[in-house]
Image (cartoon, rainbow, N blue to C red):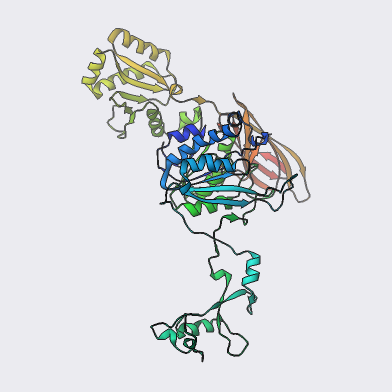
Amino acid sequence: MNLMNKLILGDNLEILKSLESERVDLIYLDPPFFSNRNYEVIWGDAGEIRSFQDRWSGGIEHYIAWLKERVEQMHRILKSTGSIFLHCDWHANAEIKIFVLNKIFGEQNFRNEIIWKRNSAHNSANRCGSIHDTIFYYAKSDKHLYNQLYQEYEKEYLETFFDSVDEQGRRYKRSDLTGAGVTKTGETNQIWRGIDVTAKGRHWMYPPSTLDMLDAQGKIHWTKKQGGMPRLKVYPEDMKGVPLQDVWSDIRVLHNNSKERIGYPTQKPEALIDRIIKMASHENDTILDPFVGGGTTVAVADRLKRNWIGIDQSVQAIKVSEFRLQKQQDLLSTPFVVQLHKYDYDTLRYQNAFQFENFIIQQVGGISNTKQRNDLGLDGKTLDNIPIQVKRSDNIGRNVIDNFQSACKRFDPELFETRRNELKKIGILIAFSFGKGAIEEVARLRNKENIIIELLKVEDLVPIAKKPKLTVSFVSQSKNDKGVHTIQLIAKAESDNDIEFYAWDFDYNANDGFKADILIDKTGSQTQQFSTGSHRIAVKAVDTDGLESIEIIDLKINGIVDRSS
């Protein structure tokens, strides 16, 4: 599988098996916790419910077995310099460490048990409140990448150790300006401002010229008592901070009004994932999240200029992650691909012809023709040199069969006659559908002239479905004295499948693409306020296959509300 930036819908075990060994630099996974409660079903769509039922069909041993076979594949695809961060809680963290991570990665590659303090307090009956999650950090080998990060100083630490305040009200601590012993170079042994530190068996940390400069900058603390030693003023902002420790209490869980919140109940803060990615990867490395959920990992990885792969069994998880990525991307962002179970007929039928040909030929294991000139109208060939032609059309007629037969013969006359004599196919023709004349001509060639042409429909190679049909209406509800209208927008979608959700962009710009303001709307109804002027609104409907439709509405508000599209 090509490791481009990709969101993949499906069972992560099967998808992980398809990835090449040692291709990923960092894995973060936040699998469903072993709480054995129905609230672990978050999105509620069919794919997630199936996964939930599989996971809980047994007890803790079944859960560990379910997780272990997935982590085994993750270990395989990690580079030797790579690391894994597994997010869990008290329900199964002991079993996960002993029976999964130690077994697969080895005890010697355990790096940290990171404690993420989620809350300040939690009410629990008959026991202490549980206010933290566990993140196990394992390396693939002792060659693993680690970037030292620093945390800000806590208030208590600053008040205790940075206990002096300068004229500007800034806190600082006093640091020694001397070092033990007398140096061989005389410059730092000199008497400075009448102070001879060599008498005490010490030397200045800086030459006199530097000490003079520091003093001129107000960075030297002079004691009030007679004969006191000067000290260096050290401010918190001059220091990197505290080297990152294994208890993280400085990243809070998302509150209900957080700008990051997208409506995903177990959504993790971007700051948490940002820290993990920065400490264990570099730009252009590949990050994998096999339980992508609300898309936080891929969104942060994309922003930090990492490559990424996100996998989830839930259609809603994949589509919400897609819309979240679209919202933050700009012209300099790296494009990404969304891989669903089914392909939209219209997207395939009307996409760039060359891209379509390449995609379809790959599905039959063929090799595309990159020349695009003097190719006899042929688009590729199989590994044993059988010509392939792809038609991005429906109802292919007899004339196409005639032309294709001639092209196959000119392509390799000797091979054409050999395969004809052996009653083997001389070519493969692929299209969306074939007319009666084409089908009859292929049958005649086979029966009368021993020329076998294989006809393949696109739907024989890839599953195809029709995207939803979407309509939008509006109801003007009220107008205030400032001319602001309150309008209810109502989206209604029809599909062969159920509609999973709607998403809305209330300031749509075709050049920027769809940037969802509302990511998850289960009802298709939104009430918004609009000021006088023109407004462009876009809504998307997503069905259970992940296929989507978009409707764009232009509203003009000037005393009355008018929909101009």
Residue that protrudes farthest toward the top in the picture: 448
- At horizontal 46% and vertical 36% (from top left) the residue drawn is 16
In the visual, does 479 lie left or right of 182? right
519 up-or-down from 382: above or below? below
551 up-or-down from 210: above or below? above
In the visual, does 9 lie left or right of 370? right
Q: Position of residue 380 (x, y in %)?
A: 32, 28
In the visual, does 78 lie left or right of 511? left
As rendered, which of 488 and 64 lies closer to the eye?
64
As rendered, which of 236 and 199 lies closer to the eye?
199
Q: Position of residue 490 (x, y in %)?
A: 69, 35
**Dividing the image into 4 quarters, which one contains the N terminus?**
top left
- At horizontal 54% and vertical 52% (from top left) the residue drawn is 274
Residue that protrudes farthest toward the right in the picture: 481
In the visual, does 428 lie left or right of 557? left
Q: Is residue 509 visible?
A: no
User: Quadrant of residue 358 in the image?
Assistant: top left
Q: Position of residue 299 (x, y in %)?
A: 54, 46
Q: Is residue 355 visible?
A: yes
Q: Position of residue 259 (x, y in %)?
A: 64, 50
As rendered, which of 438 and 17 lies closer to the eye?
17
Residue that protrudes farthest toward the bottom in the picture: 194
**Dividing the image into 4 quarters, which one contains the C terminus?**
top right
